[in-house]
Amino acid sequence: MVKLIDGKAIAAKLETRVARGVAELATQQRLVPGLAVVLVGADPASLVYVNRKLVKTKAVGMRSIEHRLPAETCETELISLIHALNQDADIHGILVQLPLPRTINANRVLDTIEPTKDVDGFHPVNVGRLSTGTGGLTPCTPLGCMMLLDTVVSDFRGMQAVVIGMSNIVGKPVAMLLLERGCTVTVTHILTRNLSEITRTADIVVVAAGSPGLVRGDWIKPGAVVIDVGINRVIDADGKSQLVGDTRTEELGHAAATTPVPGGVGPMTIACLLSNTLEAARVSAAMHHGAKVAADMTSAA
Ligand code: NAD
């Protein structure tokens, strides 16, 4: 029987650790991490995600500051808001919920976020840091995938990993993280030929394609680990709406472990957002402390 990796339980543990870190910052530095969440328009899925993020942020003791803007908001207005949040010392993390309305260039908006407050890890500085292995803030879903893999893989070195999907928010960053850990990584996409032959060589498969049931049992070699990032809403045989992933979990009996949908990668994404916000607040506190020490030394000299 394939082991189902319990993302809900692992995310809950991470949230408990984050809550402890938030409490420590409050007592030691008198600092409460603040996360600004910016939502433009009223996309129903985005509303659900943003509400979930706000509830969880408060639950771990952080401040969450919500900016809900009308769908007609223009790019210049949105960029002005980001500039103001960049300057606000009480804000440690800035999250712009995607997708943005088509009239707004999302890249230009994301590039405006101060990299040390970019808790989604999408700013080119953080993307560069990830690809050079030099720290920075890591995108939440890929970070969550690695934490789930860490519960079943003790040594990644030399393993064959296949990533299905090459988006900037999941596929590419997860490939970078696997590479950093010593895997030999193959990144595949919609134009890849003979995908099933490639996945059959893998010790680890991470699928983020958004294609329900794409990965069949015979695509996976015995003993491999499969991380299913896909979230797809489908109508089942009884006409009921259902969430499914990109794999056919029922065909994965011969795999070592896999993640359920829902309850696998999904809960990790929000937990990692909280963890990144705590990290950003810690870095801000350390920078503030460093600047104060330097100022004290200058005035004493
Ligand atoms: P995307 O549409 O930006 O990218 C999809 C990628 O998959 C592309 O590179 C495309 O070439 C590839 N692809 C699509 N169909 C394919 C196929 N048949 N064979 C091979 N490659 C194929 O999507 P995304 O934003 O990366 O999201 C992917 C999936 O992950 C979606 O279902 C999304 O809802 C889900 N997702 C989940 C979380 C989470 O928290 N669990 C977070 C982000 C995305």
Image: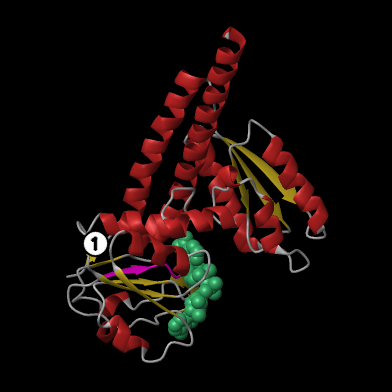
**The C terminus - image quarter:** top right
**The N terminus - image quarter:** bottom left
Residue lying at 79% horizontally and 47% vertically, measured from the top left = 80
Q: Which residues are magenta?
A: 225-231
Q: Nearer the viewer, residue 171 or 230?
A: 171
Residue lying at 23% horizontally and 72% vertically, measured from the top left = 203
Q: Nearer the viewer, residue 242 or 28?
A: 28
Image coords of residue 244 (percent x, y): 42, 72
Q: Is residue 296 among the parts visible in the rendering? A: yes
Task: Specify few, some or many for label 1: CA neighbours under 10 Å numbering under 14, 14-19, or 20 or more.
Answer: some
Image coords of residue 276 (percent x, y): 48, 44
Residue 100 shown left or right of residue 272 in the figure: right
Of all residues, the one furthest to the bottom in this rendering is: 194
Q: Is residue 139 magenta?
A: no
Compared to 266, does 36 lie above or below? Answer: above
Residue 215 lies in what quarter of the image? bottom left
Residue 49 lies in what quarter of the image? bottom right
Image coords of residue 175 (percent x, y): 40, 67
Q: Which residue is mark 1?
A: 156
Image coords of residue 223 (percent x, y): 17, 73
Q: Is residue 237 among the parts visible in the rendering? A: no
